[in-house]
Amino acid sequence: MGGVLPADNHVHTEWSYDTTHEASMARSCEQALAIGLPAIAFTEHLEFTTGVDGDAIGGVATDARWWIRIKPLDVTGYMAAIEECRQRFPGLRVLSGVEAGETHLFAASSGAVLRAHAFDRVLGSLHAVPYQRKLVAADALFGSMPADEVMRYYFAELLRLIEGSGVYQVLAHLDFPRRYWPAGPHLFREEAFEEEYRTVLRALAGTGRVLEINTKTPLACVELVRWWRAEGGTAVSFGSDAHLPQRVGDRFKLAVDIVEAAGFRAGRDPYDFWRR
């Protein structure tokens, strides 16, 4: 690869509701330049607390433990900040974007925002799942059922997200609850859920979309990325999921080693996804 790093396609700043005062779009750009990234995509959270007509969330109640934190994305202010960074950092490609949550449940709400703005990157994610007629944070399930069942429950809902929404181009952190594995994330074993992984990956590949290699989540092993390729996946995206400037591009060299071992390579365009 000649030392060239990929673009970081998953970064949060002060425009996301779950960041601290240390978050900064400008300082994230400085970090990207300092470590040699060709591009950075600011994919701020796009989440909703109530449904509208056309949202499948319908009669599912909201769990205050999850929803009380969510704030609307100020798209106008965010886009102005993007343009300011593009002017300030001409040596870095600065991409706009959102991480859209649960879009199969909020199709009308998310669709209205996405149609109104030409974002460069749209990530799809699943942070919350319907459970006992409430939408709850996925990791909260660990207190309600055995850990293995939590993952299987999550993968089943993730399949509904893939099959029920086409508004995003990259699937972010496909195994999100593993971050909260009760015995410790380092003890999570992907092979225990190979069938579930492959089912999800096969469905995603069938849509022609891209799989994210998320470096905040305990890194995917080479075998998992090989499952993606075996099930028909053709491209991967790298995302630090950084909520602090110093985490932009975190562990990208290791992630590149994993992706290359699974048979994916950088293309001629340094801003593009990596492909098989």
Image (cartoon, helix red, strand yellow):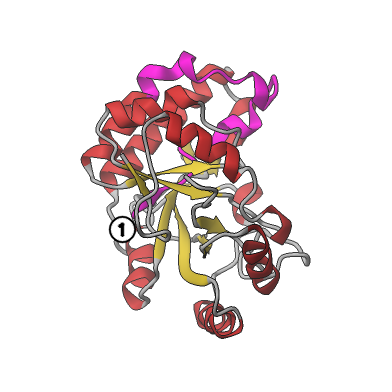
Say which of 18 and 231 sits in front. 231
Give yes or no for residue 175 being in the magenta stretch.
yes
Q: Is residue 135 magenta?
A: no
At x 29% / y 61%, what residue is drawn?
54
Looking at the picture, how far across and down is residue 64, in whole percent? 63, 51
Q: Position of residue 79 (x, y in %)?
A: 51, 80
Residue corresponding to mark 1: 167
Q: Residue at x 73, y 57 (%)?
A: 246
Element carrying mark 1: loop
For the view shown, which residue lies furthest in the right direction? 21
Tell me the crowding category of disc 1: few under 14, some 14 to 19, or many 20 or more residues within 10 angstroms, Cα based.
some
Most extreme residue toward the left is 206
Q: Observer-nearest residue: 152 or 210?
A: 210
Q: Dividing the picture into quarters, in which one does residue 143 lie?
A: top right
- Residue drawn at (48%, 14%) of the image: 192
The residue type indicated by label 1 comes to Val
Image spot of residue 78 (x, y percent):
55, 77
Q: Where does the magenta region start and end?
A: 169-197
